Image (spheres, helix red, strand yellow):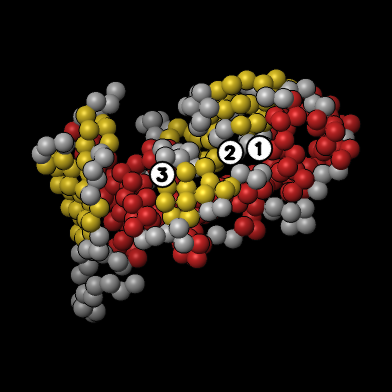
Amino acid sequence: MPSDAIRAALLKRLRANSGITEDDVSEILALPIIVRQYVPEQTVVGDGDRATECCLIAEGFAVRSKTIADGKRQILSIHIPGEIPDLMSLFLHVMDHDLVALTPCTLGFIAHEALQRLHHRRPKVAEIFWRDTLIDAAMFREWIVNVGQRSAPARLAHVMAELRERLRVIGRIDGNTFDMPLTQEQLGDALGITAVHVNRVVKQLREDGIVELQRGRAIVLNEAKFWELADFDNRYLHQSPTT
Amino acid sequence: MRHARFHFDIRDDDRFTRDDEGKEFADVKAARKEAVETGASIARDVFMSGSADHVVVDVRDDHDPLIKISITLNVEDPVRPASKKTA
């Protein structure tokens, strides 16, 4: 993958979310990045690891998750191209959760030192990344509300609606269709329900003509019903520099 | 290690979902655990919304029925007579 393509989704996202200037864009283009490939379920950086670099997703999907003593896993967030899911490791040196590839991933690693130098040289870039981690926190708040308060079908619809909004910013939706490459087991880990319950919810949403989830692709069948079920308000994603 | 396929047919008052594809679990014990957890979590949704007061999870292998999990909401309220579907 050419060097600029690795940063393409990141720049698309930063241009939309934070009104980055072209001077700062060229600084990000100049950051040294080491590209590595990951396979599904491969841990990128694990709970307890000491991180020395941050990882930019160039291609593929990843999740952050945490596993409790009896082996049950909670997926905490889903990540898409253009995101740096472990940006906080720049300041929080030892990982308190796992970052795991969901699909085959092309990841670009940026050394903490390089990011720190850039932050010192260009405080505006530091602000942009700070804002990015705050949006990350806003997404976690929404995730807690979702898993804590909504019914299982609404939970799934909300996670789908959010993913679609984020994919839209990087130009990765195709009409009413978008990628959601999670197995029913992984969806269960994300929503706090069993894989069998996920299977039932997926069937129910298809039967009710709301949304279809098949082989990692989501197809919205009825936009109004989907919107109502998801109870989705995109304000918390702060997808423009003025929000 | 997962080596046996189990099917989970689920029924509440409103809806029957037949599980033709099934899922793999290590043994009957693991399938039973999945069925109980699934039943409890579906019951939470349908009881809270008032759309049903009974949930059944029927577990079968490729040939025979194995386990039936049945969860019923039973409210005793002497002041207000029980009324279904109060959502």
Q: Amino acid at mark 2?
A: His
Query: What's the residue at 66%, 44% (across, down)?
Result: A170
Q: Pick whichever, A50 or A34, lies toward us.
A: A34
Query: Pointer 1: what residue?
Result: A83
The answer to which quarter of the image holds residue B13 is: bottom left
Q: Residues within 10 Å of mark 1 (few under 14, many from 20)?
A: many
Relative placement, left or right, of A220 versus B41 is right
- Badge 3 sits on which subunit? A
For residue A171, say whether it is visible. Answer: yes
Q: Quadrant of the C terminus of chain A?
A: bottom right
Q: Which mark identifies residue A214?
A: 3
Say which residue label 2 marks. Answer: A79
A132 horizontally vs A97: left or right: right
Q: Looking at the image, which residue is at 77% across and 53% down?
A: A241
Q: Are marks 1 and 2 in contact (CB under 8 Å)?
A: yes
Q: Secondary structure at mark 3?
A: strand
Cβ–Cβ below 8 Å for labels 1 and 3?
no
Both labels 1 and 3 in a single chain: yes
